Image (cartoon, helix red, strand yellow):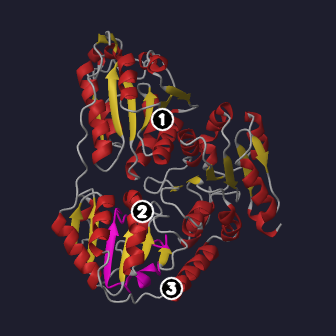
Amino acid sequence: MADKPLGAQISHMLKSRGVDVVFGIPGVHNVELYRGIEEAGIRHILVRHEQGAGFMADGFARATGQPGVCFLITGPGLCNAMTALGQAYSDSVPVLAISSCLNRADLGIGRGRLHEMKDQEGAAGAVSDWSHTAMDGATAYRLVDKAMTEFATRRPRPKHIQVPIDVLGKRVAAAPDAGMTPARPLARPEEVAAAAEWLLGAERPLFVFGGGAVAGAAAARKLVELTGAASICTIAGHGIISDMAPLAYGPILSRPDSVREIAKADLVIAVGTELSEVDLWRDHLGHRSPMIRVDIDPHSLADENRAELPILGDAAPFLEELLAMVDGQVRPSTQWQQTEISTARARFHMEADQARPHILSICEKLGPVMPDDTMFFTDMTQFAYVAGEVWPLERPGHWHHPSGFGTLGYALPASIGGKIGRPELPVMAITGDYGFQFTLQELGVAVELGLSLPILLWDNGKLKEIEDCMVESQIAPNAVVARNPDFCALAKAYGANAEKPTNLEALRKAVLAAFDADGPTLIHVTPEVVNG
């Protein structure tokens, strides 16, 4: 390819590496990134705020399994997207942010230039796996390939590449062809054999599946069936084992009394999970038995939940190899009983309902009637906290929640990115009245693109979770009530559909109709809908 400005060459390179969609906003500092987009055949999604670009890239990545890419301007553009990058970092999502930065001669000088930051590279590095500056075309190409290689071979986390404005406009040769991608690290055969021996010798084996094990769901399901193992999943791992499976506890780790169930196991096998605070809401898993722990990230294997058999390797191949080793082997009958697990699940659902009333009834009404293969994107709201525990899931990788960083405003833009990534399949957003207002402007993107997107907005008229926290801490509640707009009128002002059902049956009909609507539908739900 003939020499072109580097900004254009980056688009061509991304296209050659499989990138078809980029999210962003053009600005005076990053216009060169836009020179080659159409020529390269990349679709650009114009967002309303750079935080939306980051969240849409995140949602696109979660929905497709491919990296999400966003183009950002120097300074405030990058800063606006840093919340989304922090969320992608904590939830292991492959997002590539490419931004401009000041001309080479101005970096770190402090001349009061437009969009100037003291340390833009360092700021982005605080919420990304890494952040580097490309001072020439060759370095930019190496960094793009470094990001793509690490997305494919390591724990996927966001990367940031910044390119000086003058470098973006400099004519350079095309990027080299993509090289071979190395394989992800695999567990050693002797480690898998040891795990198989431990598993076959256990009477009450318990698997804990996290988001890192999603790709190994088929093997995981056969393993628990063959071995009579019980299973628990994290929110990210929800659906790896069907909620209908007889020995599946589901996503119950955050229930304080789950430690009593975990303590029943005589072997715990934790696969692809960080066992973090936002998984457990306590310091320790609660097991008393030996543990096998499998993870692609060595950092996770060295935390407070130490395993007697730590295994560094990709979860899916491990599960497949473990299945091959135990298939056909004679083992003692499992001591787990379906009744004890179903009784525990019912108790945990009751606890969730008592802690945050009304929501369980809605989930029980909607969950079983959702279209096949629906993917959900949720926000930091009490509705999502309950639904994450009780919503029935048959497939893995279909419930996406901002678990780690815990940012508000995630659901709407992430669901838009998810719907763009899988346009023919159903996607639904679940948000709260306060968090929705963080990113509500992205409703314009969904309208502009004609996305059939149900947006369930749970409106309890306050920051209810924070109010509950204050009461529990014996603090008089304050600053937890804000005047809300007329949400339906607001949605219609953007050109979206809007419904405010008054009872559960009307809610069911509104949600189902929204999947086939011409454009997004805001469904305004208050606690009164349960008694309507």
At which x and y percent is residue 175?
29, 21
Q: CA distance from mark 1 to mark 2?
A: 36 Å
Local secondary structure at mark 2: helix
Q: Please state which amino acid type lies under the numbered disc 2.
A: Ala
Q: Is residue 256 above or below residue 527?
A: below
Quadrant of the image occupied by residue 166:
top left
Q: Which residue is mark 2?
A: 217
Q: Which residue is mark 1?
A: 80
Q: CA distance from mark 3 to mark 2?
A: 21 Å
Magenta region, residue range: 250-276
Local secondary structure at mark 1: helix
Quadrant of the image occupied by residue 384:
bottom right
At which x and y percent is residue 506?
81, 59
Identify the image quadrant of the N terminus: top left
| 333 with respect to 195 (left or right) | right
Q: Are marks 3 and 1 in contact (CB under 8 Å)?
A: no
Is 464 in front, or is 30? 30
Q: Residue 37 lies in magenta, yes or no?
A: no
Q: Which residue is mark 3?
A: 338
At which x and y percent is residue 388?
55, 64
| 210 with respect to 482 (left or right) | left
Residue at coordinates 48% horizontally, 35% vertically from top-left? 80
Q: Is residue 41 above or below residue 149?
A: above
Q: Residues within 10 Å of mark 1 (few under 14, many from 20)?
A: some
Q: Are marks 3 and 2 in contact (CB under 8 Å)?
A: no
Q: Please state which amino acid type lies under the numbered disc 3.
A: Gln
Q: Please state which amino acid type lies under the numbered disc 1.
A: Asn
Q: Are marks 1 and 2 in contact (CB under 8 Å)?
A: no
At which x and y percent is residue 363?
66, 66
**In the image, farthest residue toward the front:** 328
Residue 284: give its label.
Answer: none
